[in-house]
């Protein structure tokens, strides 16, 4: 009956500590602290299991001796895990905290190894008899005092850290974990000195140590040093500004607060996938929790109004942007037209003499009655028209260029078309342009072409052939013209002093000049 009663007591203790482990796993808020505390509960269950094995399975001295040493595994590790839980709770630098806990576990491992090797050195327990040693006859060594001091230091450090770092106002209930700690210290002192009444009223070391250590941690939970989430109902009822509810997986309500609306299961299934906004601007949100669902509502009507205002402003800005784009397009078209008009006016001003000459030729064409004279005047009109066309093309090419440049090839094409039109005036014309791919200042190219046109207009009635040559020597454009004419050209070209006229033969004349821009002359 005694053995049966002792087994029942062990089962009650183990069931109680298993239930405590489940309680810690469900309700302790801090994740790493929860792991440490559940580890403490598992060590207590392990301690009672070793006690049961020692007293009810192993009856030989060696088995009891090994189980006795195994007591010190949970006895040393429980205070270390408690101190680790406190460090995890208060420390912000996780890497630094892990290094501290590794040091604590290293010291605990050394102490455990010293207990298991006690038969070799007997620094924890001393035995007067020969092996096999028994826990019925022993005394305490120096390492036993170190182990006791280590346990006391860890438990005291845990309570001091939790109390100092606590944010609970008042701190009136912090005596709850202190009292079990004082009782555990008193029991240890009485057990070391082997006081008789200790063996009578609290002789079971496993039951006393586990009960008082569990009381220390549970006292920390009750006074708020270790945070738990066990008061759901009070929390939901006192949270005045929170409209929420907790349901199980079948959407059965367990806790609620505020004015959370009633929802159908179909609507809840939709909310699980995405948030749902009601007509009044109330958004229903959801997060999964262990064992069910958490739904809560929030008023986003103000945000919806702001969103509507933003959409209206966006539409207004879009409309304004379209109007600005049309305005810019109109302005670009206007500027383009102005630029075109400016270019046309400039071309007209630069070719005013040719336009006037063209008008005179048209009048002569209307008055003439001779067929031969008619063809002659018509040829001159084609020559002037060709010049107007090619010069306009050169000017437009000049202003479409980014750097106000023209190539010698542009001049060559213009001279080619003008020389071809001179055939109508019965004038043999040829040209030569050096380095057609070279880019030059547009004014130089235009001056070369204008010089050619001036010579043609001035000498078209007296010359039989012309060879027009443009070359670049020492970065300077040089114009050389060979003309066959029976008339003295020196008199006809006296109004252009920059043109040097030389008579090479009886009817052959050589005209040359250097093309210089106005800024070069200055």
Image: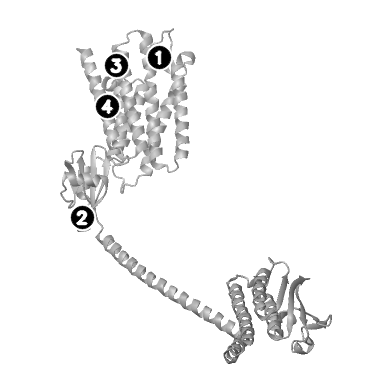
Question: What residue sits right under mark 1 in the picture?
Answer: 138
Is 423 rendered above or below residue 8?
Answer: below
Q: Tell me the mark number nearer the camera, choosing from 4 and 3.
A: 4
Q: Residue at x 35, y 38 (%)?
A: 31
Label located before the other in sequence (3 or 2): 3
Question: What residue sits right under mark 2 in the picture?
Answer: 278
The answer to whether residue 475 is seen in the rendering is no
Label located before the other in sequence (4 or 2): 4
User: How far apart are the alpha carbons under marks 1 and 2?
Assistant: 77 Å
Q: Residue at x 29, y 44 (%)?
A: 172
Classed neighbour count for the residue bearing mark 1: other residues with Cα under 10 Å, few (<14), some (14–19), many (≥20)? some
Label located before the other in sequence (4 or 3): 4
Q: In which quarter of the image is the N terminus?
A: top left
Mark 3: secondary structure: helix
Q: Tell me the mark number nearer the camera, choosing from 4 and 2.
A: 2
Position in image of residue 407 (x %, y %): 66, 69
Question: What residue sits right under mark 3 in the picture?
Answer: 52
Classed neighbour count for the residue bearing mark 4: other residues with Cα under 10 Å, few (<14), some (14–19), many (≥20)? some
Residue 18's mark? Answer: 4
User: How far apart are the alpha carbons under marks 4 and 3?
Assistant: 16 Å
Q: Tell me the mark number nearer the camera, choosing from 1 and 3.
A: 3
């Amino acid at each position: 009956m005694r053995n049966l009663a002792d087994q029942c007591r062990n089962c009650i203790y183990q069931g109680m500590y298993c239930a405590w482990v489940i309680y810690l796993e469900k309700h302790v808020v801090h994740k790493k602290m929860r792991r440490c505390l559940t580890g403490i509960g598992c060590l207590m269950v392990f301690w009672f299991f070793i006690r049961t094995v020692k007293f009810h399975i192993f009856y030989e001295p060696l088995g009891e001796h090994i189980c006795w040493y195994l007591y010190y595994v949970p006895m040393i590790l429980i205070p270390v895990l408690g101190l680790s839980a406190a460090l995890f709770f208060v420390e912000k630098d996780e890497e630094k905290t892990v290094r501290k806990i590794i040091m604590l576990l290293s010291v605990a491992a050394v102490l455990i190894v010293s207990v298991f090797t006690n038969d070799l050195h007997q620094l924890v327990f001393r035995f007067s008899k020969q092996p096999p040693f028994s826990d019925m006859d022993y005394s305490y060594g120096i390492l036993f005092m170190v182990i006791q001091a280590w346990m006391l230091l860890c438990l005291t450090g845990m309570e001091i850290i939790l109390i100092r770092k606590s944010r609970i106002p008042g701190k009136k209930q912090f005596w709850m974990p202190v009292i079990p700690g004082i009782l555990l210290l008193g029991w240890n002192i009485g057990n070391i000195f082997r006081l008789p009444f200790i063996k009578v009223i609290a002789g079971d070391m496993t039951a006393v140590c586990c009960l008082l250590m569990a009381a220390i941690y549970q006292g920390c939970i009750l006074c708020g040093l270790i945070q738990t989430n066990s008061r759901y109902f009070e929390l939901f009822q006192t949270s005045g500004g929170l409209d929420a509810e907790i349901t199980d997986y079948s959407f059965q309500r367990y806790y609620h607060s505020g004015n959370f609306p009633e929802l159908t299961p179909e609507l809840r299934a939709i909310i699980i996938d995405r948030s749902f906004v009601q007509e009044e601007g109330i958004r229903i949100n959801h997060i999964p929790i262990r064992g069910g669902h958490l739904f809560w509502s929030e008023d986003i009507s103000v945000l919806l109004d702001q969103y509507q205002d933003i959409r209206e402003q966006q539409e207004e800005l879009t409309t304004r942007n379209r109007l600005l784009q049309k305005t810019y397009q109109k302005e670009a078209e206007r500027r383009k037209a102005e630029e075109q008009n400016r270019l046309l006016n400039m071309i007209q001003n630069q070719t005013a003499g040719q336009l006037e000459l063209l008008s005179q030729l048209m009048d002569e064409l209307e008055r003439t009655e001779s067929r031969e004279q008619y063809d002659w005047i018509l040829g001159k009109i084609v020559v002037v028209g060709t010049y107007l066309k090619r010069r306009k093309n050169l000017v437009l090419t000049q202003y479409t260029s980014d750097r106000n440049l023209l190539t010698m090839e542009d001049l060559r094409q213009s001279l080619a078309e003008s020389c071809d039109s001179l055939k109508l005036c019965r004038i043999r014309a040829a040209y030569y342009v050096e380095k057609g791919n070279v880019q030059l200042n547009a004014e130089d190219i235009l001056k070369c072409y204008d010089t050619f046109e001036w010579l043609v207009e001035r000498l078209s009635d007296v010359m039989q052939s012309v060879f027009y040559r443009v070359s670049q020597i020492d970065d300077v454009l040089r114009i050389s013209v060979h003309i066959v004419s029976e008339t003295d050209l020196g008199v006809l070209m006296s109004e252009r002093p920059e043109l040097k006229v030389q008579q090479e033969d009886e009817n052959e004349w050589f005209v040359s000049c250097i093309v210089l821009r106005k800024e070069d002359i200055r």
